[in-house]
Image: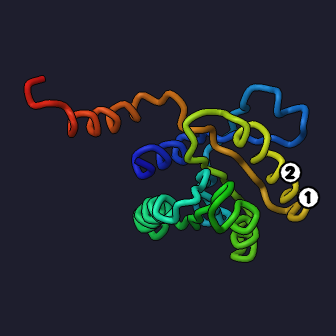
Amino acid sequence: MISVILPHLVKVGFFIQRTSRQERRQPFRLFRELPQGKNMAKTAIITLAHGSRLSTANNEVEKLVEIWRQQKQERDKLYIYTAFMQFGTPSLGESIKEAVKEGCKEILIAPLFLTSGAHITNDIPEIVSQMREQHPTVHFRQCPPLGSDERLLNILWDRVKEHLPSKI
């Protein structure tokens, strides 16, 4: 799923930036596409999942991100990380620190969330605000959640078809 959806987000530039508590209440603002060419800053994409108390669930996220990392990193020179909001490691803050340590100057938070709940609208911007203060030379952006993207319906339909009675 991530290899189908998130590369499109990166290529067409659907990114948001929140810089203050007031902006949290404002609609998402769109920004330009990623810079291209020799002068492109090192860019990190942090794929952020909710996390689970079940390690097998967190392992599925890690596996998905590893597949995406293999597809994108070599060709696009992106640094792709995994992070969890809770019940898993690394945390968002830990992944941001790792990306900064790697020399990334652009950090995109790509949430594996379906809707704009409390983590998307409050928690992530708060963590990013703290990280922005610690790393003022780094440019942070947050992608919107997956939302009601019709491409998700194809995946859902594939899952449903696997369990439909053969008579239908």
Task: State the colouring used for the structure image.
Answer: rainbow
Quadrant of the frame with the C terminus: top left
Residue bearing the label numbered 1: 133
Q: Position of residue 142 (x, y in %)?
A: 69, 45
Name the image quarter holding residue 33: top right
Left or right of 71 on screen, residue 81: right
Mark on residue 32? none
Q: Position of residue 113 (x, y in %)?
A: 57, 42
Residue bearing the label numbered 2: 129
Is any atom of residue 37 visible in this view?
yes
Secondary structure beneath label 2: helix
Task: Name the residue at 74% across, 64% down.
Answer: 105
Three-letter code for the amino acid on which mark 1 is drawn? Glu
Task: Name the residue at 48% across, 58% down.
Answer: 57
Q: Position of residue 29 (x, y in %)?
A: 73, 32
Q: Is residue 132 above or below residue 123?
A: below
Q: Quick one: which residue is furthest to the bottom in this view?
A: 101
Task: Name the residue at 50% across, 27% down.
Answer: 148
Q: Quick one: which residue is furthest to the left in this view?
A: 167
Three-letter code for the amino acid on which mark 2 is drawn? Ser
Secondary structure beneath label 1: helix
- Relative to the observer, which residue lies in front, 132 or 112? 112
Determine whether label 1 and label 2 are within 8 Å by CB: yes
- Relative to the observer, which residue lies in front, 119 or 66? 119
Query: Callout 1: few (<14), some (14-19), or many (20+) C-alpha neighbours within 10 Å?
Result: few
Task: Name the residue at 41% across, 28% down.
Answer: 150
Query: Callout 2: few (<14), some (14-19), or many (20+) C-alpha neighbours within 10 Å?
Result: some
Name the image quarter holding residue 163: top left
